[in-house]
Amino acid sequence: MPQTPGPDGGIKTTRTTFAIVETLHEREAARLTELAAAVDIANSTAHEHLETLEGCGYVVEDEGLFSLSLKFLDHGTRAKRRYQGLIEAAKPALEGLIDETNETMNLVVEEHGEAVYVDRMVGERGVPTNSWAGKRKPLHTLAAGKSILAHLPDERVDEIVSTRGLAAVTERTITTREQLEDELETIRDRGVAFNDRESHDRIRAVGTPIVLEGEVFGGIAIAGPAKRLTGEYFRSELPDLLLGAVNEIELKLAYH
Amino acid sequence: MPQTPGPDGGIKTTRTTFAIVETLHEREAARLTELAAAVDIANSTAHEHLETLEGCGYVVEDEGLFSLSLKFLDHGTRAKRRYQGLIEAAKPALEGLIDETNETMNLVVEEHGEAVYVDRMVGERGVPTNSWAGKRKPLHTLAAGKSILAHLPDERVDEIVSTRGLAAVTERTITTREQLEDELETIRDRGVAFNDRESHDRIRAVGTPIVLEGEVFGGIAIAGPAKRLTGEYFRSELPDLLLGAVNEIELKLAYH
DNA sequence: GCCTATTTTCGGCATATCCGAAACTTAACG
DNA sequence: CGTTAAGTTTCGGATATGCCGAAAATAGGC
């Protein structure tokens, strides 16, 4: 009894449309033939799709090169607004953390079983990373993501793990159900989650969930180079700062 | 000989998909029946579409209410990256303008014949406005938009005006071809464009294009309440500051 | 200026979209 | 707690339409 239809099922044309969109996302810009091959459709079909996408304003064409248009940004900003309350509640606390640590702050929510960055602030010592507003990553690979998982209902965690799996992105990524269960238990006990090079070989992070009346709204994390995030600073100073910040955020959310 | 198919033509299913997406954008969240009525399709069709959109991850459902997902933000951030060079080149200059004026700065580009905000910075005195990253408005109603039009090839302007028209959004909006021609001529002469309550009843703005080797890359504008933007400050101080900033941006772009 | 690679047009078939009605679920009210 | 109404989901069938393959047109390279 699959609620949501699998990768197949549903309207085929729409799936093709978004397959093209996603290919354009990956490649930044692509030619017609290249797209047709990547999506595995006839050239003529790709042609019709691209013409339609351009006509609807979702794709721009420049000398035979197609790319996604800013209409996605418009819709994206709209979608983000659903989290406006959370973002605004978190902002001052995250700024405070930046002042105190100068590291990088991430605000993450769960959507469709994935972690999505909705806001990030980079401190002076912040390293450039591969995440930005809208970027999606597996929940089980992130400090904030694991924090969220730890406070989601068990059946939801089951559902997520069974559909998304536990893919390894580094050598240290959690890949088994048992590991995950233990980790989530630990996180619930101590209130914070650690990400020790589980999403990137040189990055460590500390994360906490934002919980209100038993419901998880998202999670925040402090991330930085593994070289610098060590010892007491990593294991106790940052967690303490983070817990203070989350407390502030939760209070703000509670009073609207 | 229509190059791009009109509002009809092209793949019908895809058009329906985006009609739903755009309705969801307008309404923030909507029920199935409501959507079916708005898009003028059968309930069962709306159901299939929504199921597919959710399966693809572009729509989220919460207790019968559907809304756009953050996937759009991901694609949008990607699309914005095409303008990264421009945005980074403009950033310091815009920050400088904020320091000097404390007003609101907008960075706008042209896409599909419309003005699209790609960046904005709000100074201390900045008023809340109805624009954000990704927001689209008619070119002929904005200071930055008119600046861009003034430096686009004539045939492109023709094309834009004939497909988009010159709709009035306030009493002072330019609505005729002659008015527009004159205005663009004036803008080319003096280097800056004024928006005197043409896009909003209480807003004035000054804008300039960013031009490199004859090609327009976008435009920047200083916007503020009509009450405060008056006299010399509006007609000469702000334009001078703006021209200095644009010069800085163009230089930065020229040296990559 | 020819030749190659890519894009665009065209016609037909098979398929998948869309609809209408009926079954089912959820919510509201007495 | 039973009844009704509103909304959602399932189902089967007719027709429209999306998809392909090949041919025509265009653009680019040498």
Image (tube, coloured by chain):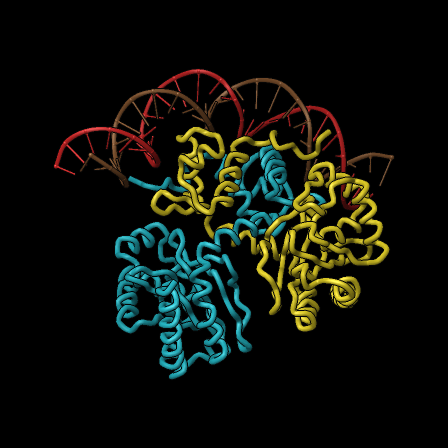
Chain colours: A cyan, B yellow, C brown, D red
Depth check, front residue: D1 or A102: D1
Q: Is residue A186 left or right of residue B137?
A: left
Pinpoint residue B236: horizontal percent, then vertical percent.
79, 65
Where residue B68 sits in the image (x, y, percent)?
46, 47
Residue at point 50% right, 40% down?
B23
Q: Nearer the viewer, residue B88 or A228?
A: B88
In the image, farthest residue toward the bottom: A232
Task: Where is residue A244? Give x, y as percent.
Answer: 37, 76
At 57% from the left edge and 41% from the top edge, which residue is drawn? A37
Image quadrant containing the C terminus of chain A: bottom left
Q: Do we see residue A202 in this rendering?
A: no
Question: So how many labels did they put on this image?
Answer: 0
* Quarter occupied by residue A124: bottom right
> On the rendered image, what quadrant is the N terminus of chain A found in?
top left
Image quarter of residue B49 = top left
Decide if residue B67 is in sight here: yes
Up the image or down, A181 lies above or below A74; here it is below
Q: A102 or A139, which is in the foreground? A: A102
Q: Position of residue A215 (x, y in %)?
A: 31, 59
Q: Viewed as shown, does residue A19 lie left or right of A185?
A: right
Height in image: A65 above or below B45? below
Residue D7 falls in image quadrant: top left
Q: Residue at x 36, y 67 (%)?
A: A250
